[in-house]
Amino acid sequence: MLLHEGLGSIELWRDFPPQLAAATGREVIAYSRYGHGRSEQLHEARTTEYMHDEARIVLPELLRALQLDAPVLFGHSDGASIALIYAASIPAGATALILEAPHVFVEPLTIRSIELARDTAAQTDLLEKLGRYHADAAATFRGWNDIWLHPEFAQWDITALLPSVAIPVLLLQGRDDEYGTIAQLDAIAAAVKHTSTVLLADCGHSPHRAQTAQVLDRTRDFLATLP
């Protein structure tokens, strides 16, 4: 099950889902969260608990509706954080986690990059480009950007949940990630017993796009170690 980034959607995974299916021999399912892609448009401001709500309310309901029992969760950025909260809250709910550029607390680097994204959206055609992938690109962008820049969100921190993650975790991050540092991965590895960490050269915030072959290889090898 693929869990997309803060501005992601089904379509923004592009051709990665079929590539992942071919590399692993597994069924791959992607969905657009509320307020993203062609799902229902966002009608209210997000709260600081929006990732907890996705992990503890929406994702369990979705898995039940799809009759999926303990899938492997592949999460990117916000999606990786949602996967961690889900695994910590529902111990038998997933078999393993594959996490690209996860966030477990807020860093100054992250805020600076999100402020830059806000300014870029105001000065360029970024929202028009996002409109190819979202029914209401402006609402999707504001829903992500506004909450991350809200003063209360500076205290967002899920590190206390990490010791409750009892399943294997593969961590993937670009060395040039503009939204987070290796401190995020270090915090996870220090608290979660079964972790493997991969740092990718010449790679920013989206390893599956920048280093597709390496991500596929590492994912296939990781899945081969599972019971």
Image (cartoon, rainbow, N blue to C red):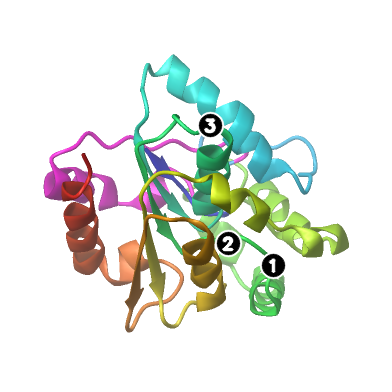
Question: Is there CB contact under 8 Å for labels 3 and 2?
Answer: no
Residue 61 position, x and y percent, is: 53, 21
Indicate the quadrant containing the N terminus: top left, top right, bottom left or bottom right: top left
Q: Which residues are magenta?
A: 8-35
Q: Earlier in the sequence, mark 3 or mark 2?
A: 3
Q: Is residue 31 magenta?
A: yes
The vertical placement of 102 against 51, above or below, is: below
Alpha-carbon span between mark 2 and mark 1: 7 Å
Q: Circle 1: is it few (<14), some (14-19), or many (20+) Cα within 10 Å?
A: some
The residue under label 2 is which amino acid type? His
The quarter of the picture where residue 221 lies is bottom left
The image shows residue 55 at horizontal and vertical percentages of 58, 37
Q: Residue at x 53, y 31 (%)?
A: 90
Residue type for callout 3: Ile
Mark 1 belongs to which amino acid? Val
* Category of crowding for the residue at label 2, using alpha-carbon neighbours closer than 10 angstroms: few (below 14), some (14–19), many (at least 20): many
Decide whether residue 55 is among the magenta residues: no
Mark 1, secondary structure of its residue: loop
Q: Are marks 2 and 1 in contact (CB under 8 Å)?
A: yes
Q: Residue at x 70, y 58 (%)?
A: 157
Query: Does dot 2 land on a helix, a strand or a loop?
Result: loop
Q: Position of residue 14 (x, y in %)?
A: 32, 52
Depth check, mark 3 against mark 2: the one in front is 3
Residue identified by numbered label 1: 106
Q: Which mark is residue 90?
A: 3
Q: Give the residue pinned by disc 2.
A: 103
Front: mark 1 or 3: 3
